[in-house]
Amino acid sequence: MIAVITGDIMNSREVVPSIWLESLKGVLLLYGDEPSAWEIYRGDSFQLKLSPDKALRCALHIKSAIKQDDLLDVRMAIGFGEESHHAEKITESNGTAYLNSGNCFESLKKETLAVASMNKVLDERLNLMLSLLLLTANQWSKTVSKVLCAAFEHPNLPQVELAALLDKSQSSISEALKRGAYDEILKLNELFQAEIKSSL
């Protein structure tokens, strides 16, 4: 069982690619090697293979990296399933995880994040959770996104050390994490992992 994230950068033509490309690559490299685990293709689209328990955290990590520019956001679909054909390039691999991810991505309308598996009851529960999460995540400011991104990359750092890393006050870090619903995201991620483990 694997997870495949298919995504693209929203409003990518509005900004110079170098603004978001290095940020995206930096996050993807933390989750696997190019091109077997991830690739960027068609200019602003990407695909990433990873373990299901890391999928939601990774998607939000990507979102926090991209939303550090006010004009940008990212659409992503997480597909759960099997990998029946493993190729040197992820874009040439195949299986139900890839099909679920691709079909889910094509069906995205107003939502910027959704999941699909072979279990439709599970999908309904998870997508309701994500819809509620996106009410906050889609509104992340540039400042909140930067702090969240650092927190995702350094989950064990106390706030005082995050503040030193970002050259900010501890109170501003605390406020940004609160506005970004970081504690709630961590709890939701645990629930997400439990749902997947028990239902897939």
Image: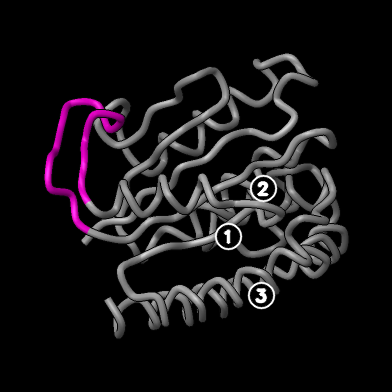
Gap in angstroms between the C-alphas marked 1 and 2: 17 Å
Q: Earlier in the sequence, mark 2 or mark 3?
A: 2
Tag 2: residue type? Answer: Ser
Is 15 or 96 nearer to us in this picture?
96
Which numbered dot is residue 183? 3
**Image spot of residue 82 (x, y percent):** 19, 56
At x 65%, y 16%, the residue is: 18
Q: Earlier in the sequence, mark 1 or mark 3?
A: 1
**Image spot of residue 79 (x, y percent):** 38, 56
Question: Which secondary structure, mark 3?
Answer: helix
Tag 1: residue type? Answer: Leu
Q: Quadrant of residue 49?
A: top left
- Residue range (magenta): 82-95
The reply, left or right, for residue 120 in relation to residue 191 is left
Residue 196 sits above or below residue 80 on the image: below
Question: Which secondary structure, mark 1?
Answer: loop
Which numbered dot is residue 157? 1
**Image spot of residue 23 (x, y percent):** 60, 30
Tag 3: residue type? Answer: Asp
The reply, left or right, for residue 158 in relation to residue 81 is right
Which numbered dot is residue 27? none
Q: How crowded is mark 1: few (under 14 residues within 10 Å), some or many (20 or more)?
A: some
At x 45%, y 22%, the residue is: 41
Is 157 or 21 nearer to us in this picture?
21
The reply, left or right, for residue 45 in relation to residue 144 is left
**Image spot of residue 119 (x, y percent):** 33, 75
Residue 129 sits above or below residue 76 on the image: below
How many numbered dots are placed on residues in this image? 3
Which numbered dot is residue 64? 2
